[in-house]
Image: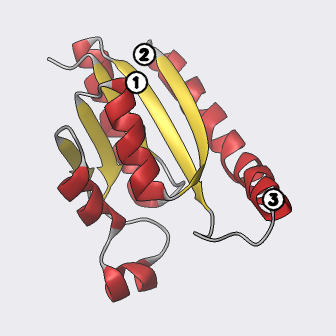
C-alpha cells in the first residue's frame, strides 16, 4: 500500500506519537521511512552568517533526535533516511514530500508553539491542506 512514508518531526510530544505510528506503518507495509526536521529561519535573514548560524542550531537541536529515530527504526527493522533542513517548515516539508513521491505524510497534531498556532493556525492544518499525499495526524 505505502512505498514511501514521510514523517515530520519537531521533537514535540505529538511528533513522538507520530513517529511511533510511522514506524508501525512502515514495518507493516515494508515502506521506506523518511524523517525530516526543519529549523525555521526568518524569511529575510540579514546576513549569510545568520543563515549559517541557523544551520548550526538545527544540527545541534535535531541531530540527537534523528539518531534516536534511526535507532528505533533499526530496532523495528525499518529502512529509514533522515533529512535535516533549514527554512520554512510547511513549505519545505511539502516540497520534500513531492520530491520523494511520498505516499503518506505522518505528523503530530501539535508542535512546540501552541501560542503561535492559536494566533494564525496550526502547521498541521496547513500541511493537511497543502500536502501532495494523504496526511495522518497523530493526537
For the residue labelled by badge 3, is the local secondary structure a helix, a strand or a loop? helix
From the top left corner, tell me how far across and down residue 79 is, in percent.
Answer: 45, 14
CB-based contact (under 8 Å), mark 2 and mark 1: yes
Q: Residue at x 38, y 29 (%)?
A: 99
Disc on res. 96:
none
- Of the two numbered discs 1 and 3 in the rendering, the one whose residue sits closer to the viewer: 3
Q: Quadrant of residue 29?
A: top left
| Residue to which mark 2 is pinned | 78
Residue 15 lies left or right of residue 126; in this view the side is right
Residue 115 lies left or right of residue 74; in this view the side is left
From the top left corner, tell me how far across and down residue 135 is, in percent.
Answer: 21, 45
Disc on res. 33:
1
Q: Quadrant of the C terminus?
A: bottom left
Reply above or below: 51 against 102. below
Q: Quadrant of the N terminus?
A: top left
From the top left corner, tell me how far across and down residue 64 is, in percent.
Answer: 70, 41
Nearer to us in this view, 46 or 53: 46
- Of the two numbered discs 2 and 1 in the rendering, the one whose residue sits closer to the viewer: 1
Can residue 19 be seen in this snapshot?
Answer: no
Q: Residue at x 31, y 21 (%)?
A: 4
Q: Quadrant of residue 94?
A: top left
| Residue to which mark 3 is pinned | 48
Q: Earlier in the sequence, mark 3 or mark 2?
A: 3
Can residue 137 be seen in this snapshot?
Answer: yes
Reply above or below: 62 against 139. above
Q: Earlier in the sequence, mark 1 or mark 3?
A: 1
Q: Residues within 10 Å of mark 2 (few under 14, many from 20)?
A: many
- Of the two numbered discs 3 and 2 in the rendering, the one whose residue sits closer to the viewer: 3
For the residue labelled by badge 1, is the local secondary structure a helix, a strand or a loop? strand
Amino acid at each position: 500500500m505505502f512505498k514511501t512514508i514521510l514523517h515530520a518531526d519537531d521533537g514535540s510530544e505529538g511528533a513522538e506519537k507520530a513517529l511511533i505510528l510511522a514506524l508501525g506503518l512502515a514495518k507493516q507495509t515494508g515502506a521506506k521511512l523518511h524523517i525530516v526536521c526543519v529549523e525555521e529561519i526568518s524569511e529575510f535573514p540579514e546576513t549569510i552568517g545568520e543563515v549559517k548560524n541557523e544551520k548550526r542550531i538545527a544540527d545541534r537541536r535535531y541531530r540527537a533526535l534523528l539518531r534516536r529515530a534511526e535507532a528505533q527504526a533499526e530496532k523495528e527493522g525499518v529502512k529509514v533516511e533522515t533529512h535535516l533542513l533549514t527554512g520554512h517548515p510547511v513549505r519545505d516539508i511539502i516540497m520534500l514530500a513531492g520530491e520523494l513521491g511520498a505516499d503518506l505524510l505522518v505528523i503530530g497534531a501539535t508542535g512546540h508553539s501552541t501560542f503561535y498556532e492559536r494566533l494564525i493556525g496550526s502547521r498541521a492544518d496547513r500541511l493537511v491542506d497543502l500536502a501532495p499525499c494523504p496526511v495522518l495526524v497523530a493526537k
